[in-house]
Amino acid sequence: MSYTIVSDVCEAKADCIPVCPVDCIHWIKDKAWKNVKGLESTYIDNETCIDCGACLAACPVEGAILDEWKPELQKL
């Protein structure tokens, strides 16, 4: 299992990136893409995620990170 960043909810604060112990959180590769709020977003590499929950605890945006893997909600 992995956590999921909901791309359209993310507010690009990136508080999740420095707390990840395995560096599995990255900026979306397509820099031209913006979410429904007009912001860039991050995503979680589920191959690397160890399900520690550090990202969820650090994120100040309610609903931006889910404690389950739902890849359809996350743009890469």
Image: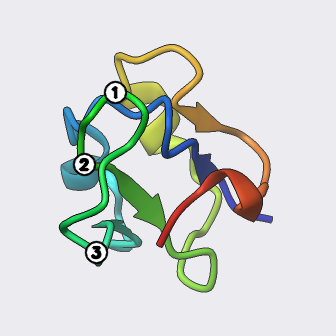
Q: How packed is label 3: few (under 14 Cα within 10 Å), some, or many (20 or more)?
A: few
Q: In this view, does 54 lie to the left or right of 60?
A: right
Element under disc 3: loop
Q: Is 39 left, or right, of 4 in this rendering?
A: left
Amino acid at pointer 2: Glu
* Whole-percent x, y for residue 24 in the image: 41, 72
Label 2 CA crowd tier, 10 Å (few <14, some 14–19, many 20+) = many
Colour mapping: rainbow
* Other residues around mark 1 within 10 Å, as few (<14) / some (14–19) / many (≥20): few
Towards the viewer: 25 or 29: 29
Badge 1 or badge 3: first in the primary sequence: 3
Tell me: residue 42, above or below residue 15: below
Among numbered discs 2 and 3, the one appearing first in the sequence: 3
Out of 39 and 11, give the one closest to the viewer: 39
Residue 37's disc is 1
**Front-most of 50 and 33?**
33
Instruction: Determine the CA span between mark 2 and mark 1.
Output: 9 Å
- Percent across and percent down for residue 18 are 19, 52
Q: Which residue is drawn at 24% across and 48% down?
A: 40
Which residue does the image show at 35% across and 29% down from the upper left?
A: 58
User: Which residue lies under the disc numbered 2?
Assistant: 40
Residue 47 percent location from the top left of the image: 62, 85
Which structural element holds mark 1? loop
